[in-house]
Image (cartoon, rainbow, N blue to C red):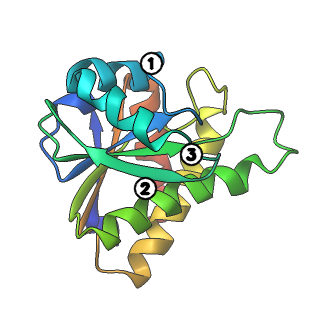
Amino acid sequence: MIDRVEIHNGDITKLALDAIVNAANEGLAPGGGVCGAIHRAAGPELAAACARIGHCPTGGARLTPGFALPARHVIHAVGPVWQGGTEGEREQLASAYLSSLDLAQRHGLKAIAFPAISTGIYGYPLKEATAVALDTVLQWLEKEAVPERVVFCVFGDAAERAYREALAKRA
């Protein structure tokens, strides 16, 4: 399964894949960080499409076209706000990844990229979030053929190191 996983340090909005995953909020509104960057790069049509959907619960995911992005689609995944780890955050974060993978599979999306969901303004500690992300995705890939390729698109050397070290432990 590890051979189907890549780590990329850079701008997720530049990736020409079947889908990129947006670290979204429950209202699917343009925000800051990765969410804001994706909305800016996709153009105003993305915000309009999200407004038509209206809402996505924490742990869920919704699919829209990619509009002006090189990616054909955007999967909007809502991760949890970190509250110390005692409020079901791990399960909610895993659910956001699983919901995204399920959408990718149902729509035949063979290559998708995830950001480090919930690690920005939602405050989820990077090391813990990385473990949830990798464990969830690798378990999915053990059983499922689609997506064929999963890219963890991180921003910055610390995040890249965290993902590479965590992936090496699972090899």
**Disc 2 residue type?**
Ala
Look at discs 3 and 2 and give the one toward the viewer.
3
Tell me the element at label 1: helix
> How far from the left and from the top, in percent, is residue 93?
62, 50
Q: How crowded is mark 3: few (under 14 residues within 10 Å), some or many (20 or more)?
A: some
Q: In this view, does 166 lie to the left or right of 131?
A: left
> How far from the left and from the top, in percent, is residue 110?
20, 65
Residue name at image x 46 percent, y 25 percent: 158
> How far from the left and from the top, in percent, is residue 106?
33, 72
Labels 2 and 1: the sequence-earlier one: 1
Labels 3 and 2: the sequence-earlier one: 3
**Disc 1 residue type?**
Gly
Residue name at image x 43 percent, y 68 percent: 102
The reply to whether residue 10 is visible in this rendering is no
Q: Distance between the residues labelled 1 and 3?
A: 19 Å
> How far from the left and from the top, in percent, is residue 134?
49, 56
Q: Can you identify the residue that label 2 sits on?
A: 168
Q: Can you identify the residue that label 3 sits on?
A: 56
Tell me the element at label 3: loop
- Vertical side of 4 occupied by 87: above or below: above
Given residues 162 and 52, the one toward you in this image is 52
Given residues 18 and 62, the one toward you in this image is 62
Q: How crowded is mark 1: few (under 14 residues within 10 Å), some or many (20 or more)?
A: few
Q: Quadrant of residue 30?
A: top left
Q: Is residue 14 left or right of residue 88?
A: left
**Residue 165 image label:** none
> Which residue is situated farthest in the front direction here?
52
**Disc 3 residue type?**
Cys
Tell me the element at label 2: helix
Given residues 93 and 78, the one toward you in this image is 78
Residue name at image x 33 percent, y 63 percent: 104
Q: How crowded is mark 2: few (under 14 residues within 10 Å), some or many (20 or more)?
A: few
